[in-house]
Image (cartoon, rainbow, N blue to C red):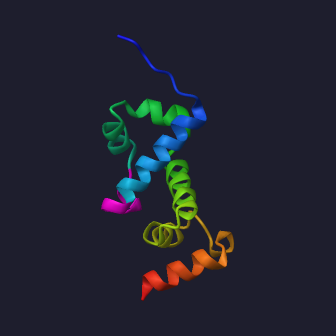
Amino acid sequence: MTRIYMRKDSRRDQIARLGLEIANEKGLNAVTMPLLATRLGANHQLITYHCGTISTVRQMIAEEAITLENARVIHQALAMGFISTDSLTPKVKKLVQQFLK
């Protein structure tokens, strides 16, 4: 069997994107190491190696949500304290406000 090794940054990006998918489906609080590992087809040690803690993973997801302007997950990240409104552009703040209406 041939193994494909990814650069650490690439794997972190993959984890953040997958976490964002899960957060969209179930909420940011539902993102766990075991769930990510299952979806990746890997074990949770892989995620720990690349990201550290679940808080770091959720922070990465929040940053990905800002980049992709995902108001639902940004709102959850704000509520959970992973990001602050200071880190949001006026455009993203407006998206979140519209989401809350």
Q: Position of residue 52 (x, y in %)?
A: 55, 39
The boundaries of the magenta stretch are 24-31
Name, please, the residue furthest toward the right. 86
Residue 25 sits in quarter: bottom left
Q: Is residue 14 left or right of residue 43?
A: right
| 30 part of magenta stretch | yes
Q: Is residue 85 left or right of residue 100?
A: right
* Depth check, front residue: 91 or 30: 91
Q: Position of residue 2 (x, y in %)?
A: 40, 12
Residue 92 sits in quarter: bottom right
| 79 part of magenta stretch | no
State whether residue 62 is above or below residue 86: above
**Residue drawn at the location 48% of the way across and 41% of the way down:** 14
Magenta stretch, main secondary structure, is helix
Identify the image quadrant of the N terminus.
Answer: top left
Instruction: Count how many numbered circles sit on residues in the image.
Output: 0
State whether residue 91 is above or below residue 18: below
**Residue drawn at the location 42% of the way across and 50% of the way down:** 19
**Residue drawn at the location 45% of the way across and 69% of the way down:** 76
